[in-house]
Amino acid sequence: MNDSPSQVPIASQDDDLLARLEEHRSIGEIPRKELEWLVAHGSLEHYETGTRIVRPGEPVDGLYIILKGRLGHFRDTGGTLRRVIEWCGGDVTGQLPYSRLGLVAGATVVEEPTEIFKVPRGYLDVIPVECPHLTAVLVHVMLDRARTFKSSDLQVEKMASLGKLAAGLAHELNNPASAAARSARLVTEALADADEASRTLGAAQFDPADLEMLEQVRSACLDSLPPGVLSPLERADREEVFAEWLEDHDVDDALATPLSDTSLTIDLLDQLEDALTGDKLRIALRWVATGCTVRSLAQDIERAASRVHDLVSAVKGFTYMDHATAPEPVDISKGLRDTLAVMAAKARAKSASLSIDAPEDLARVRGFGGELNQVWANLIDNALDAVNDGGRVVVTARAEGSSVVVRVIDDGPGIPDEIRSRIFDPFFTTKPVGEGTGLGLDIVRRLVQRNDGHIEVTTEPGSTEFRVTLPAVS
């Protein structure tokens, strides 16, 4: 303890303490003889609001039986103090028999005037002998407390993962959303130009033979060049060729961009030029080009909307939003692809290569899909943190015997020998204050175990590999 409480002499208050302990919600039902042992070996202490009973990095100095008041336990997670649990009159906390609690990870603060009956730590080893019924009660208290801390830690890591997911998703959605908005604005202007070009075309009174030739050119413009067929340099060269042809025929070379993005050829333009001359050629090409522009903008909007839809589908798959909270066959390959989709923004920010090698017909595993995706997200996130700019992270999944093995491999500097044994410890982190909770790999280990698997790591300079092995569905 760090703040000295006021103590009340026990000798003059044995009967009062016994009566209060007999009314205590947690331990009041144990035999009176054991309560008398507690009274003989403990002390009644009073704490004022704001007192810190324990501080981070210090041991707990005894068993606390709270008679009245309220305590709050807080932990520093990523630079922010977070309430983990509270205890009120009728609760028991502090150091408990059989507990492996060593140094405290957080601070316990008195939140209102509190009375605690404290049994010093030195007596804890004899409590199981002298007070077996009390020990049974305290073991249940310890298990409940451990579940609460684990649940809280998992929630913290989930919120941290959600923050990373939200940031990555916002970045990923921004590009297609901006593209759709930009194209939607431009399509309004393009439609106005197309309407005017259509009116001009109608007023020019083309004969049927001219319209037939014009329709051939228009049909060629209906087909856009497939993405990736031409390199950016080749596209620029193609646009320059179209611009030169238009200039040679006294046609606005601004039409070169929409025309060159289609399957139209110079030979077809030459055929059109043979059929039409002068103003009719300019009117015809303007009508064709405005139609191409409208169509191209519509395709841009469609592609952007499809990208948004794909991202939302990936997030939905990543979180398993529509799945029951019970073990079920999990498609590891799909989970990894969904995870990579939501982590891609971070990889691009570091100019890092992030790739996956997982067969689509990979055997399924039985487990909680959302939890496994959180495992992949944490491991990939750590790998991207580890690599230098321009580094490489490779994720593989393979069936090996009766198991599925997922490997996350990075080409970073490796994990130093002096901390390798501690990387799965709760609250251990090598990241600067405010950037890491120290829960990531601890949560990963717990989630893997919860899904009946195990995790291993091998590391050396230039290569670190985390392996998660899960039993395949037979």
Image (tube, rainbow, N blue to C red):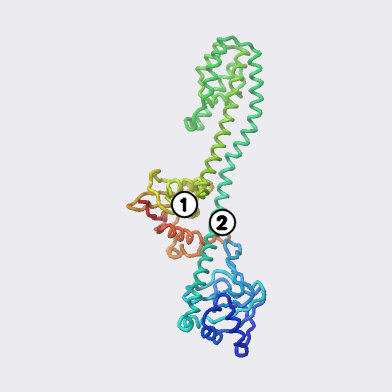
- The residue that disc 1 covers is 369
**Residue 446 at x, y percent in the picture:** 46, 61
* Residue drawn 56% across the image and 71% down it: 56
- The residue that disc 2 covers is 159
Say if residue 403 shows up in the picture: yes
Q: Which image quarter: residue 77?
A: bottom right
Q: Residues within 10 Å of mark 1 (few under 14, many from 20)?
A: many
* Residue drawn 52% across the image and 29% down it: 235
Q: Is residue 147 above or below residue 8?
A: above
Decide which of 317, 305 is in the foreground and name it: 317
Type of the residue with mark 1: Gly
Q: Is residue 172 above or below residue 136?
A: above
Decide which of 60, 8 is in the foreground and name it: 8
Q: How many marks?
A: 2
Quadrant assignment for the N terminus = bottom right
- The residue most toward the bottom is 11
Say if residue 410 shows up in the picture: no
Q: Is residue 332 above or below residue 121?
A: above
* Residue drawn 63% across the image and 35% down it: 182
Q: Which image quarter: residue 357?
A: top left
- Of the numbered discs 2 and 1, the one sitting upstream in the chain is 2
**Residue 262 at x, y percent in the picture:** 53, 25
* Mark pair 2, 1: CA separation: 17 Å
Q: Residues within 10 Å of mark 2 (few under 14, many from 20)?
A: few
* Residue drawn 40% across the image and 46% down it: 358
**Left or right: 234 with respect to 276?**
left
Type of the residue with mark 2: Met
Q: Which callout, 2 or 1, points to the residue nearer the camera?
A: 1
Q: Which image quarter: residue 419?
A: bottom left
